[in-house]
Image (cartoon, grey):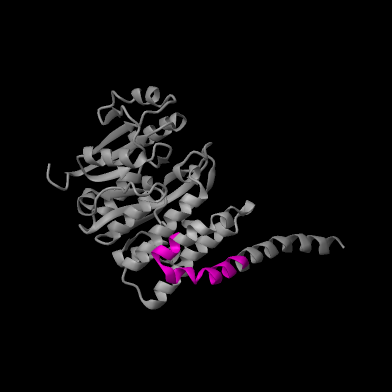
């Protein structure tokens, strides 16, 4: 095996922890893939529920390798362990609570293999809840520029991808992303300095060296429920990671003065959402986040007030819009 892994082989890494109720759906959706050259590395991180019992059912499958850790290490450590174990040219970090269309890996391989400098191929995701009910489509909540640019399958250059990532994590679910092994060789693995944003931070590093490919079909099923990492983390900690990541990247990426202003305001807008959150928790956290912003990028702090005003206008507009149908119905009844 060379530095780039076994040619054409996809290594799927499943980091398992206390999601027994979703594991059958996860494993079956991987075993049903139409793409054949594939190994599935399942690493259980000391689950305390029935996860190991469920996973042992798949231990006899020739493409499945089950690893049971003796000590809990967390999602980032387990994912990096799987990356080290992987032998394929491509790696898919498949979250243990998600699922996918049988054609997903085949489509992603076809997209990433078009050019050697494409480091990541990712697809749209259908968002589902813990009962498999559809909540929406991640594409629909993207910024207008991304939706216009990625309405069909396309290649996204590294500079353009950096700008999309400065607005939001346009790959909101690692289960939807096929990553060329060489990316990990060049930029390293997932960082343990982040919990909620480790994938987002990794994609920024990849975008400094590689292009991306987008498959416009929703082939991944991204599950939302109360025990995901981002759901479990408190707002204060999650926002701190957002600010640390975005303000750090704004300073590292070659941007025009206008672009730098735009992305600073956007970062402050994310802070304003937390500030205006219910129960005044955002106001209680203000000294903590203010200190963080001032240490990272003092110029951004002075853009908080315009961002707050922008947030108030948007919330106020939505409130007024929610009243309009009621008024219309009332006028019709008079």
Residue 184 shown left or right of residue 130 in the figure = left
Q: Quadrant of the C terminus?
A: bottom right
Above or below, 295 relative to 190: below
Residue located at (49% from left, 65% from top) = 268
Q: Indicate yes or no whether the magenta region holds residue 115.
A: no
Q: x%, y% of residue 75?
A: 36, 40
Q: Quadrant of the N terminus?
A: top left
Residue 95, by quadrant, is: top left
Q: Please give the count of numbered marks on the rendered protein.
A: 0
Residue 260, by quadrant, is: bottom left
Question: Can residue 298 be spotted in the picture?
Answer: yes
Residue 208 shown left or right of residue 265 in the figure = left
Q: Indicate yes or no whether the magenta region holds residue 296.
A: yes
The residue closer to the viewer here, 23 or 269, is: 269
Residue located at (66% from left, 65% from top) = 316
Residue located at (37% from left, 47% from top) = 174
Question: Can residue 11 be spotted in the picture?
Answer: no
Above or below, 311 relative to 217: below
Q: x%, y% of residue 308?
A: 57, 67
Outermost residue toward the left?
Answer: 2
Q: x%, y% of residue 315?
A: 63, 63
Residue located at (28% from left, 57% from top) = 206
Q: x%, y% of residue 71?
A: 32, 29
Q: Which contiguous range is marked in magenta?
A: 292-312
Dominant secondary-structure state across the stretch colored magenta? helix
């Amino acid at each position: 095996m060379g530095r780039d892994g076994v040619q054409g082989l996809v290594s799927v890494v499943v980091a398992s922890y206390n999601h027994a109720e979703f594991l059958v759906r996860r494993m079956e959706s991987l075993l049903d893939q139409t793409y054949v050259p594939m190994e599935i590395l399942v690493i259980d991180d000391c689950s305390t529920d029935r996860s190991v019992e469920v996973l042992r059912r798949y231990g006899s499958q020739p493409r499945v390798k089950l690893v049971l850790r003796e000590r809990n290490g967390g999602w980032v450590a387990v994912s990096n362990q799987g990356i080290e174990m992987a032998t394929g040219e491509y790696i898919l970090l498949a979250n243990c609570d998600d699922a996918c269309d049988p054609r997903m890996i085949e489509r992603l391989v076809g997209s990433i293999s078009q050019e050697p400098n494409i480091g990541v191929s990712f697809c749209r995701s259908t968002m589902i809840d813990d009962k498999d009910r559809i909540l929406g489509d991640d594409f629909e909540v993207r910024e207008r520029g991304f939706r216009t640019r990625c309405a069909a399958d396309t290649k996204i250059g590294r500079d353009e991808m950096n700008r999309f990532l400065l607005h939001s994590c346009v790959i909101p679910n690692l289960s939807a992303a096929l990553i060329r092994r060489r990316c990990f060789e060049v930029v390293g693995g997932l960082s343990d300095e982040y919990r909620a944003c480790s994938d987002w931070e990794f994609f920024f590093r990849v975008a400094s060296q590689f292009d991306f490919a987008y498959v416009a079909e929703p082939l991944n099923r991204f599950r939302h429920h109360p025990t995901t990492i981002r759901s479990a983390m408190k707002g204060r900690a999650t926002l701190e990671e957002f600010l640390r990541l975005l303000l750090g990247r704004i300073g590292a990426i070659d941007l025009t003065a206008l672009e730098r202003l735009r992305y600073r305001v956007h970062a402050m807008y994310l802070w304003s959402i937390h500030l205006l959150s219910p129960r005044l928790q955002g106001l209680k956290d203000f000294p903590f986040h203010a200190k963080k912003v001032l240490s990272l990028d003092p110029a951004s702090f002075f853009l908080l007030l315009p961002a707050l005003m922008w947030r108030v206008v948007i919330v106020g507009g939505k409130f007024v819009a929610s009243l309009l149908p009621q008024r219309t119905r009332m006028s019709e009844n008079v």
